[in-house]
């Protein structure tokens, strides 16, 4: 290829009407077109510039999708060349293939947008299910602030400055705690484009546990963690999306155990490493377990065992994990309960997050 700055500038600045010039004729006919010598072409608006740049032969072909012209591609030569029918036929095929590729990309982008919207809806729905627990979680530090403020006023009236100072410190600490709770909720619920970065999976799990703590306590579930120190390598992932997966698995386990009338309610979250699969995260509960006939349907969209469930939570969780290059599956335990596990590659698995 050779530089033709004046011709390129003239092409970018010009608007081509249907039937006018090479791109206009290609657009109108929906067929490739060949010009042997631009200098002798009457219907070519850029002839003076082409002559100065010593351009002669030209051909263009449409990018087609069905009957729609998506665009026109032009090629130029400094030599006078006669039309090549075989080349024109090849270009017609290429134009159709490019159109199909563009359509696939459009469909993929639309699917990713829909998945992102659905993921956001399920995050908000999960928070909606936790409304009572979230209100309790926020109310605790707010109540403490009110109590400490009243005590501070009493001690100031009694001229007990040191006690008042300590009470003010507790007010500040409780206010920070309330702010942290709100920030966690806002961060989890916000609608934003996926953003992958290096992150510590153990730290992410602790953040989710802090968000779900009141819901776990409200349902009288004993939560235990076994977060392996061996899980040192950072993973390249979208933090909000992984939080969504972990929170969904925790809430599902808590809801399963809340329906039990007897027996211990125990929830274990553990992490470990596997040489072939990377990091392994497991969520084990002591609930009623899984029916064999449900195992192959758990991750199917719109399948749910909850009366008010949408049936999208686990399906979205699996799509998130697979988009990160991992795998999510469930297994029943021998005695009672179920274990949901997922793997994540270490060393920067660069699959795209769900957008």
Image (spheres, helix red, strand yellow):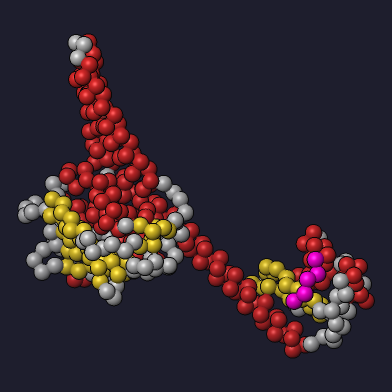
Residue 315 inside the magenta-drawn segment: no
Q: Is residue 4 visible?
A: yes
Q: Residue at x 85, y 82 (%)?
A: 79
Q: Residue at x 48, y 58 (%)?
A: 113
User: Range of the magenta residues?
Assistant: 1-5
Residue at the far bottom in the pictured view: 86
* Residue 177 screen position, x and y as percent: 28, 36
Q: Nearer the viewer, residue 23 or 142?
A: 142
Q: Is residue 256 visible?
A: no
Q: Quadrant of residue 213?
A: top left
* Residue 206 screen position, x and y as percent: 25, 51
Image-based side of 131 in relation to 6, left or right? left
Location of the N terminus (image quadrant): bottom right
* Residue 297 screen position, x and y as percent: 28, 68
Q: Quadrant of residue 341?
A: bottom left
Q: Nearer the viewer, residue 120 or 244?
A: 244
The secondary structure making up most of the magenta span is loop
Q: Residue at x 35, y 62 (%)?
A: 235
Q: Residue at x 36, y 48 (%)?
A: 188
Q: Nearer the viewer, residue 330 or 142?
A: 142
* Residue 190 screen position, x and y as percent: 41, 46
Residue at the far front in the pictured view: 162
């Amino acid at each position: 290829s050779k530089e033709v700055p004046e011709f390129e500038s003239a092409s970018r600045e010009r608007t081509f009407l249907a039937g006018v010039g090479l791109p206009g004729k290609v657009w109108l006919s929906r067929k490739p077109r060949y010009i042997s010598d631009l200098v002798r072409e009457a219907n070519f608006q850029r002839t003076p510039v082409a002559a100065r740049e010593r351009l002669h032969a030209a051909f263009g072909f449409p990018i087609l999708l069905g009957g729609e012209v998506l665009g026109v591609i032009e090629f130029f030569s400094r030599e006078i060349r006669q039309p090549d029918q075989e080349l024109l036929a090849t270009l017609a095929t290429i134009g159709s293939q490019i159109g199909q590729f563009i359509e696939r990309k459009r469909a993929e982008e639309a699917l990713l947008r829909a998945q992102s919207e659905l993921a956001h809806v399920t995050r908000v729905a999960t928070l909606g299910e936790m409304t009572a627990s979230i209100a309790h979680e926020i109310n605790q530090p707010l109540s403490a602030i009110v109590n400490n403020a009243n005590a501070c006023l009493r001690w100031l009236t009694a001229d007990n400055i040191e006690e008042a100072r300590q009470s003010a410190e507790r007010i500040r600490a409780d206010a920070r705690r309330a702010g942290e709770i709100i920030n966690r909720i806002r961060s989890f619920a916000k609608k934003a484009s996926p953003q992958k970065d290096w992150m510590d999976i153990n730290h992410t799990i602790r953040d989710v546990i802090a968000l779900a703590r009141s819901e776990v306590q409200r349902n009288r579930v004993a939560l235990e963690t076994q977060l392996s120190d061996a899980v040192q390598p950072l993973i390249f992932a979208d933090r909000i999306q992984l939080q969504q997966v972990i929170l969904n698995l925790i809430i599902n386990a808590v809801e399963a155990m809340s329906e039990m009338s007897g027996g211990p309610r125990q929830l274990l979250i553990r992490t470990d490493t596997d040489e072939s699969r990377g990091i392994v995260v497991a969520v084990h509960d002591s609930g009623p377990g899984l029916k064999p006939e449900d195992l192959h349907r758990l991750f199917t969209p719109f399948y749910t065992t909850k009366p008010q469930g949408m049936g999208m939570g686990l399906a979205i969780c699996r799509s998130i994990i697979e988009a990160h290059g991992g795998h999510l599956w469930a297994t029943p335990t021998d005695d009672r309960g179920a274990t949901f596990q997922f793997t994540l590659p270490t060393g920067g698995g660069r699959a795209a997050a769900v957008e």
